[in-house]
Amino acid sequence: MATPYHRVTESFRLLMPRAVAPPGRTPAEVVGGPHPAAGAMLDGRHRPHTRPLFLDEGDPLVHDAQAGPDDGRDETLEQQADRNWGELLQEVRILQTGVQILTGFLLTLPFQQRFTELDGYQRGLYLVLVVLAVATTGTLVTPVSIHRAVFHRRMKQNLVTTSDRLARIALVLVALLMSGTAALAFDVTLGRVAGQVAGGLLLLGFAALRIALSRSLRHR
């Protein structure tokens, strides 16, 4: 004799819609089955995705919330933009610290006693370096200013793209600034030729490292 519990359970079973599997797939693979891509590795553990429930072929009732590219991360496009923005800010902080120290060093040079002994070429190079330092600082600060301007306007993707371009420009300015500072120091200490050689070699070294390391990482 069936109990009331069994009757209710049987009623629910009859009312529930049955999943119709597409050709070549079993119902177990359609309802809650593991994703063939085997999910994503997160925190050292395997997290399988689930497939949407189908009533018939091509009629999904449950959509996958994953909207981002298949890069192995379990995140949406908005989460990816937030992560990229946070990583970009960390890079900007590192660059800004070095630029601020170098800018402060350059701004104190006119107050040194030997600054009056510099010739016209050295003073011109010094002024170029000051302009580069100020331009680099402004370029690194601009992403924060843009973020304030577009705050709460759902433009994080555009913000990340623009800030990435500004960061690339800032890297070029930093390379020029450091090479020029080394050229000025060698020029004052060892002479004009030594300064030009030192500045040129340092600039070529920065460019070589940038190109070589980038190609090496891309081919891995």
Image (tube, rainbow, N blue to C red):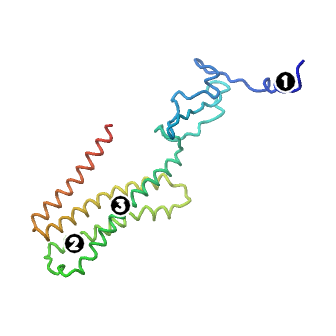
Which residue position holds label 3?
Answer: 95
Q: Is residue 185 left or right of residue 159?
A: left
**Nearer to us: label 3 or label 1:** 1
Tag 1 residue: 6
- First-in-chain label (3 vs 1): 1
Q: Toward which corner of the image does residue 182 lie, by quadrant?
A: bottom left
Q: Answer left or right for 219 relative to 42.
A: left
Give me the residue at 50% from left, 52% from top: 82
Please report contact status of discs 3 and 1: CB closer than 8 Å, yes or no.
Answer: no
Whole-percent x, y for residue 129 in the image? 25, 69
**Badge 1, how many Cα within 10 Å: few under 14, some, many 20+?**
few
Residue 22 picture location, percent across and down:
61, 21
| Element class at badge 3 | helix
- The amino acid sitting under disc 2 is Tyr
Q: Residue 28: give its label.
A: none
Task: Give the residue type that dot 3 points to.
Answer: Leu
Q: Amino acid at mark 1?
A: His
Residue count near mark 2 (Cα–Cα under 10 Å), binned few <14, some 14–19, many ≥20: many
Above or below residue 14? Residue 143 is: below
Q: Compute the Cα span from label 2 to label 1.
A: 90 Å
x and y, in percent, of residue 116 in the image:
17, 81
Q: Nearer the viewer, residue 40 or 77?
A: 40
Q: CA distance from mark 2 to mark 3?
A: 21 Å
Residue tagged 2: 126
